[in-house]
Image: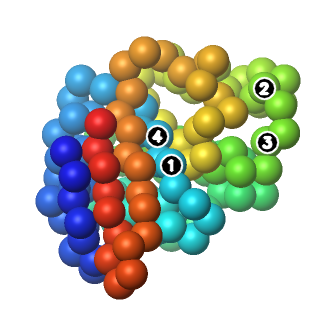
Amino acid sequence: MQFTLSENNLNALVNEVIKRFETCKILLLKGDLGSGKTTFVKKLLLSLGVSDKVTSPTFNIVSEYHLSNGTSIYHFDLYRIQSIDELYNLGFEDYMYLNNICVIEWPEIAEALLPDNVITIDIENKESERLYSLN
């Protein structure tokens, strides 16, 4: 499913991802540096009811947010991860099976640790818009 959207018009995509969270809790965001991954995460978490300020967890690797229903959301940014051993040391694999929502930017290095059932969004910059491909 593809969405060509401006940064300010992500509601349809956000709603589709939230619907898919009913059966799958792991969202992978792929795209070049500056493609809008964190911007999408901010809109998604706001729509889910997160009231905390959402920022990219580039330096601390993971940020945790909480919904009013007790669900935790873990937002990962794996850009700085150099090896899969670092992910093992973080306990990354445990997060994947807690039945909470995990949103992962730069997930490529973690592919061996991911379950089979994930949601993937590929983001590509196209002049003044972005192309979001939802798989």
Q: Mark 2 near mark 3, Cβ–Cβ under 8 Å?
A: no
Residue annotated with mark 3? 81
- The three-letter code of the residue at mark 3 reads Ile
**Residue 27, picture quadrant:** top left
Judged by depth in the image, the label closer to the viewer, 1 or 2, is 1
Q: Nearer the viewer, mark 1 or mark 3?
A: 1
Kindly identify the amino acid type of the residue bearing the numbered disc 1. Lys
Label 1 or label 2, whichever comes before in sequence order:
1
What's the residue type where badge 4 is placed? Leu
Image vertical order of residue 112 relative to residue 3, above or below: above
Q: Residue at 59%, 38% (x, y): give it.
A: 107
Q: Which residue is mark 1?
A: 30
**Residue with the mark numbered 4:** 28
At 32% from the left edge and 57% from the top edge, which residue is drawn? 132
Q: Residue furthest bottom?
A: 128
Looking at the image, is mark 2 or mark 4 earlier in the sequence?
4
Q: CA distance from mark 1 to mark 3?
A: 15 Å
Question: Toward which corner of the image does residue 49 lie, by quadrant?
Answer: bottom left
Real-space CA distance between mark 1 and mark 4, rounded to the nearest whole angstrom: 6 Å
**Residue drawn at x 62%, y 18% as measured from the top left:** 113
Image coordinates of residue 130 in percent, x first then y, are 35, 69
Q: Is residue 30 left or right of residue 59?
A: left
Between disc 3 and disc 4, whose residue precedes?
A: 4
Quarter of the image with the N terminus is top left
3D distance between C-alphas at marks 1 and 2: 18 Å
Is mark 1 in CB contact (under 8 Å) with mark 4? yes
Q: Which mark is residue 84?
A: 2
Q: How far is disc 2 from disc 4 in space, using C-alphas?
A: 17 Å
